[in-house]
Each structure stands twice: as C-alpha cells, then as structure tokens.
Amino acid sequence: MAQAYTPGLTVARRAVVRKMRKLPLPGETLVKVGDAVEADSVVARTKLPGDAHPLNLSRALSVPESDVERHLLVKTGEPFQKGALIAETKGFFGLFKSRYVAPVDGSLETVSTVTGQAILREPPKPLEARAYVKGVVVETLEDEGAVVEMEGAFIQGILGVGGETHGELVLAVERGAELTAEEVLPAHQGKVLIVGGSVRADALQKAAEVGAAGIAAGCIDAAELRDCLGYELGVAVTGAEEIGLTAIVTEGFGRIDMAEKTFELLKSLEGRHASMNGATQIRAGVTRPEILVPMEGEGEAYSASALTLETGAAARVIREPRFGETGEIAELPVELQEIETGARVRVAVVRLQNGDEIALPRANIELIGG
Amino acid sequence: MADNRLRSVLATDCGSTTTKAILIEYVEEREGGSYRLIARGESPTTVEAPVEDVTVGALNAVTETQEIAGRTLTRGGRILKSSVDGEGADIYISTSSAGGGLQMMVAGVVRAMTAESAERAALGAGAIVMDAVASNDRRLPHEKIEQIRRLRPDMILLSGGVDGGTTSHVAELAELIAAANPTARLGAGYDLPIIYAGNIDARELVIERLGQRMSLEIVDNLRPVLEKENLLPARKMIQSKFLEHVMAHAPGYKTLMEWTDADIMPTPGAVGYMMQTIAEGRGVNIIGVDIGGATTDVFSVFDGVFNRTVSANLGMSYSVSNVLAEAGIDNALRWIPFKVDKRALHNSVKNKMVRPTTIPQTIEDLVIEQAIAREALRLAFEQHKLLATGLHGVQQQRTISEAFTQTATGETLVDMEALDLIVGSGGVLSHAPRRIQSAAMMIDAFQPVGMTQLAVDSIFMMPQLGVLAQVDAEAAMDVFERDCLIPLGTVIAPNGEADARSSLHISGTFPDGAALDETIQAGGIRRWELKEGERMKVKCVPKGSFTFGEGRERGAEYEAQGGTAGLIVDARGRPMTDVGERLDLYPKRKR
C-alpha cells in the first residue's frame, strides 16, 4: 500500500549491489559472465554516429537547388578529409569557379535537390561502457553491455553533482567541521574526501584544482552550491555537471552534520578505493547519489526491503523544526492527528536521542537502515 | 435503455509517482438515481525498477479500493470485469502519465505560426513539448540537429506551410530531423513515431526523407490556411501513436491495454477533455490548474476554444527550487507576513526538493510553501496566457475605430473579465489544511476580475472522469458535480489601479436576511460566510480607478454562489501591485 513515510537512504557496511552497464546504442559486449573487472575495465564498446553538418550547397556555390548534385566531386557515402575539395562549379570558361572544401573529416550523407542542402557526417566516435565498480560480471546483455556485481559498503547520499568517478577514501574533516579551501591539499589528487560537516564552494573549487576525484560531505549551504555551479540548481536532476569533480551530500542543505553512522562507516573505510556517482533524479524511480566501496565482508548483506515502520525502528527527522535529529519510533497511532498547520495526518511518535518524545507526520521521518 | 446503463465503473490514473483508483456506481435515489464515487485507493506507481510493471501498481490501487468499498474487484492477479453478484465492475478504464508522460518535440516553418500551432496540438493531446524547432528560430542548422538528437523525444510532430505554400522549408526540416536521427526515449528497439501535419504538397518530400527511417504517419495539415487551425487530426494521431508506440514499450502497458475497455489516455489529455466537457455543459469560460510536484498544467476554455500548457519545471517538490529561482525570492517573500532569513529559505526550499514527500509541520512552513505555490501558479498562468492566443499572422478586417486601437493578431484568449470559473487541483490546493487557503492562493496567483467562481478538485479524479466522459458523459458529469468538485465560493474584484482615491462599495442581503453594506478602500480584501448551495445578489459600485469593465464602469450586480470559503471581495486592484490586506488564513499557534 501507499507509503506515508520515506524508506530512507541506504548506509550499509555490507551490501551486494548490481550495476547495469549499458551502451546507449547497440555495440559489442567485451566481457563474459564470471569475469573479474576493475572500475576502469571496458565492458562494452560501440560507435556513436558522428556529428552531422548541414550545408546549403546551393547557396555556397550560387547554383539552383536542382543543380547541386552535378557539381559534387564526391559520391554519397564516400569519405573525405578536412580541406578536400568536395564541390566545384565549372565557372565561366574555367574561370570564376565556386568551390567548397570539406570543413571536417567525414563523408557525404545526403544531398537534396529540393533544398540544395547536403549533410556531411563526421566519422563515428568510439564510445565505451566501463565497469564503474570493482566486481564480477554476473550477466551479459547481448550487444549492449553487462551487469557487474559488487560486494562491499554501499552508502547513498541525498543529492550529488557530477558523474561517475573513483578514488581512495581520505578523511578531510571530522563531524561538526567545515571544509575550507585551505584544508584541501595537493596530496588530495585522485582522492575521495570525507567531510563530516559542511563544504564550502571555495573548497570544492580548490579540490577540483588539485585533481581530487570527489567529496562526500554532510551538507552544503544552498548559496555555496550556487556559487560552485555558477547557477541555481532548480530541478533535482543532476549528474552531468562539469565542476571538475563529483560531490555528494548525505543530509541536505544548511548546516547538518553527516549522520554519525554514515560518518563512522566512511571513516572506517579510509584508505580503501571507492566508486562514486553524483547522479540524482528525484522523481518516480528515484536515483540517489552513491558511494560504493568493494570489499569482502561477513554477515548478512543489507536489504532495503528489510526496513519496516514499526515501534523501535531507528528514524531520522527530515524536515524542520527538528531536522536531522535521530531517535526511535515510540508509537504509531492509527488515527489521523491534527498537527500545528491544521492538517490531519498520520503521525509517528518519535523518542529523540535527547529524550524528547514528539509526534511527527510520518512523511517527515525516514527510517535509518543498514 | 435503463437495462443498458453502466452500473459500475473502475478507473485508474497511473501517475508518475502514484496510481489512483476510483470506483463509481450508479446509485438509485428517490429522484431517479445518479453516478457516485464509492471508494478510492492509491498505491505507488510501478513502472520503474525494481518492479517495472505498471499493472502491479494498478492492481495494488484497485485492491485498496476493493477493501474500502467491500466489493471484490480483483481475482487471480487480474481486474474482475462484468459486475455480477456484487463483484467486479462493468468497465475498467485508465489514464497514464507514468514514466514522465508523453514527451514530444514539434517542428514548423514559422515559430509564431505553424510551429506554435503544432505546439498547441501536442499540448492539447496531453504531451510535454520539449522543444519547438522552426525554420526561423535563429538557431543554426547544426544546432537544431544537435538539439533534436540530444532530446530523445517519444514522438515528433512536424508541420509547416499552409496548403499550397512553402515546400522547401518543410523538406529542409525533414532533412534536419533525418540527419539527427533521434532514438526514442524508451529504448532503441523501435522506430521513432513522427507525424506529419503540414503542407499537403510537401507530403512526398517528407516521405522520401523520413519514411525509411522512422514510423511516419501523415494527417491533415494542422494549419491548412493562415486563418484556421485544424488541430484535431494531429491530436488524435498523437494519442493513437502514444498507445501504439510509447505505451506499448513501457513496462506492463501491453497487459494494461488488454485490460481496459477504452483506449488509455495521457492524463493531461483526459483532464483537458473533462475541462471542455464542463465548459460546454455549463456554458462557461473556465481555467483549470493542476499543480504537481514537478510540473504545473494550466487549461483554459474561452468561448469554446480549448488550450492547455504545461510548465515543465514549476512544481512544488522536485522543481520547487526552480520556482524560487524563476519568480525571484522577493516575489515569494511578499506573500509571507513575517520576516524570513533568505539564506534559510533557500536551504529549506532545496531540502524540500531533495525530500519531496515531506509536508509542512509548522504554520511558518505552511505559509512559506503556500507563498511559493502562489508564484508557481502565477508563472504557469503567465506562460499559459502567452500560448493561449489567437492565430498570429492572420489578416484582420478592422473598422476605423479598431484601426486606431491597433489590436495585434495573436492576442491572448484568456479574458479575465469573461472568466466564470477557476478549478484548482494538485496537492497544495486540494490538500490545503483550510479551503480558504486554496481560494486565497488562486485569487493571488490568477487575479480574477469581475465575478468568478472558485472550486477545487477534491481528490484529483478529473483524469479518470475525462476518460469516462468519452465512454459515458452523463456518468462523468454526475460524479464531477457531486463528488469531485468542491465549490469554494465566489470572488468579486474590480479592475484598475488600487490608488488612494479608489474604493468599492458593496451591498446586498445574505440568505439569512442580514444586510451587507460596506465600503472597501483600495488595498482591502474581505470575506463573508456564504455556504455551499446558497446564493445572494451583490451590488458593486466602484469609485476612482476601479471599474468592472466596459458598460459597467459605474457598477455591476452579480449573483454570488457560496462555498467553503464563502464570498470574497478583493479591492487590491488589478493588476495587483501591492499585497495589501491579508485574509485570516492560518490557525493561531497553540502555546
């Protein structure tokens, strides 16, 4: 039935995660089931059609549209190199010729005698799908890619920017602290920095300058993110930002420390190699940013479906006024209750860590799993 | 005839996040019986991973409905049809906007003419228009190719040229589309549907260029002559292709299509159909709005002309941060009667964006959310007015006096003085803790003029009623009037600047016999109780800059209808430049 609460983000020391690595167009799958892969391993390859260059030949040669074909020096499909003469008029007694040279390497795709337009196509571009995480191929997708299974730590953030990357985890600052530009060092090149508190825009910029792979922080101020991106992030669809690195916040915006459990887990993994992806899409089929740390583990793997809303379950408040506080579910009244706004909603009574017991809309808490 | 009457209807709307099911039954009453809403259930939509089958969410929603209704509606993982022995429903119908709805790209020769007509056709069919490419849109050809390739639409609508007009520009557009060769969003496994609705003389050229590469359909020109739009054939083809290609490739939809007794409609297409049915049935001009988490849809029917726009990034959760960015923080702050730290507001809005299911818990939080909703509604309505226009480029015959006023072609069809009814729906309007808050949000955002009725869709069942209206209009209207629409009441507002010399005198007699006789100074707003079903005549005499329009400068008399918000008289001026007085909307904080 409909869920009136947020299942929460996964923070698990041991999880089995499968990643589908798929090409956007059919190509060639290069791995087979059982293959061990590293984050950088290429699992499939294809060729993207090259860029199309429309060219009004009729105008370029000053000839009628219906005549362009007979002035062409290359045939449809024939390759040419940049600078090659591809069309020429006969001129007047061999003089005053109009010529057209290819602006790029490519081939002639089509010529229209109605519009006088030719389409030049650049050579195909190779495109590869990489494994992204260290693991084992458990399934191949014919001509499209493979599914890679990783075993290890799995941590979801609330929002990220930037795409897939990987690097060694390094603790930059503890909980309660803010990462400033001065604390970002040249030694952080290629590393994923763990920030227990907030991160400032200048620190993100410095991290990109030193070549850090990524930053996983508790929170960021909305204004700092805007300064870093150069624009206001209006819609929660990210992953394609080009800020020189990948950044993930685990809690949200403002000043909220990274949840203790998340921080302690990341800290314990310092020195290990992590894959991370900032891509976030908060609509149906929610995609959250993630940090994956492959390692052999013991004990039962975490399962998201194991989380149920019940008394005793660990929960976190995800909206003001007690945003970020954690506690456990003390009571789950069945009847709707009126809250301060006058709305009648289903509530959960949460016993916070400081001992306060408060009734909160179930929509405003998330279960802490893992 | 009575024997053939539908006795029960089961309808679902598979939305992008939630699938909603309703059960409607024909209920015998003393006056002869009518269709009524019996039960409603909902469940998360299951188009995406890990379930990837829309029918699971539909069955879950129907199962909840069956539990509430106490009537068996499913058996063996299927929806039970033909109502016998109090089980099942006579028919099952559905709408869908799951998986992001229908995303289209349109193209035409002139941006303000055929491309705009194509945009209206696509929007009216329930699509989100990702881009409108035109020969004269100032982008270079290679930029257009890159854009078409990048967008990956579900479908393309190509128009261009009036019949007998340009063919070369149409051919050029077809060449650009062919060069881009975009792949469909829902997978590379099928040909992208493209509909050509342009110059009849260019059909062969379009077939030559696109026929081999894409699934091409040709319909009548949507702009056969400059003076006329003919959008219906294109709209019908869009909906048919939506089913045949887009839906058929979305997970589980083949089964869902087998279950339904009528074609599955795109959700906004069904809402639009319902709006038209209401406008026609009641003989009124209407504006409807559906404010969702990601988008806001605005519908209007003026003098029978239907328009729909979708503002793709104006919503109250996923895109709430964009509302603040587009509106400007000061525009949002003007609706908040207490001091707010701007930095904290930005953080709070972004936290809502990343945790979209949370709800306001404090009165301050609710005031802020409703302030942002006003701005989302205002911006979406502005966008609607820009697209809901008469045809651009049409030669007009003018009288001498009209020649002096120089009315332009392509003016908005949205005439606030002629507007009769505003219907609001979507979480922030339908679920506001107090109905008066919904009324206030709509008044502030739309700024109606003259007398306008306000209503909200109680549980947003207009999509299901829209598709039902195609099967049985009487049943749809019955449920709409009795169970769907909640009348909020009436707002009366004069046009004109709210300057110091302006005021409005109103008088009348309430149904209980009490007298209404009050002068409201410019900048004021008042509310009186007027219950649902009650009516009263209100005489309005404007002074100063206030007016009720041509022929009513000296006064107007209206018959106001009651509702949960009552009668509201708004003398804050039109256009409203200052928020002025505020209605008492929120409960007092308990100490």
Image (cartoon, coloured by chain):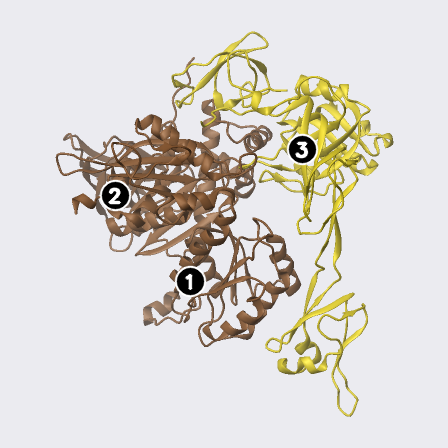
Chain colours: A yellow, B brown
Tell me if B33 is positioned left or right of B270 in this view.
left
Tell me if A125 is positioned left or right of A219 in this view.
right
> Which chain letter goes with mark 3?
A
Q: Secondary structure at mark 2?
A: helix
* Sequence-first tag of 2 and 1: 1
Q: Amino acid at mark 2?
A: Ala
Choose between B239 and A329: the one closer to the eye. Answer: B239
* Residue B130 coordinates in the image, percent (x, y): 54, 52
Displayed quadrant of residue A116: bottom right
Q: Which residue is mark 1?
A: B410
Crowding around mark 2 (Cα neighbors within 10 Å: few <14, some 14 to 19, many 20+) is many
* Residue B418 coordinates in the image, percent (x, y): 30, 52
Marks 1, 3: nearer the viewer: 3
Mark 2–mark 3 Cα distance, whole angstroms, equals: 49 Å
Q: Amino acid at mark 1?
A: Gly
Displayed quadrant of residue B168: bottom right
Q: Are marks 1 and 3 on the same chain?
A: no
* Residue B579 coordinates in the image, percent (x, y): 42, 37
Crowding around mark 3 (Cα neighbors within 10 Å: few <14, some 14 to 19, many 20+) is some
Marks 2, 1: nearer the viewer: 2
> Against B450, is B238 above or below?
below
> Which chain letter goes with mark 1?
B
Q: Are marks 2 and 1 on the same chain?
A: yes
Q: Residue at 53% across / 28% down in the picture?
A: B340
Whether the residues at callouts 2 and 3 have beta carbons within 8 Å, the answer is no
Q: Which residue is mark 3?
A: A18
Q: Which residue is mark 2?
A: B475
Mark 2–mark 1 Cα distance, whole angstroms, equals: 37 Å
Judge whether residue B486 can be spotted in this image: no
Q: Secondary structure at mark 1?
A: loop
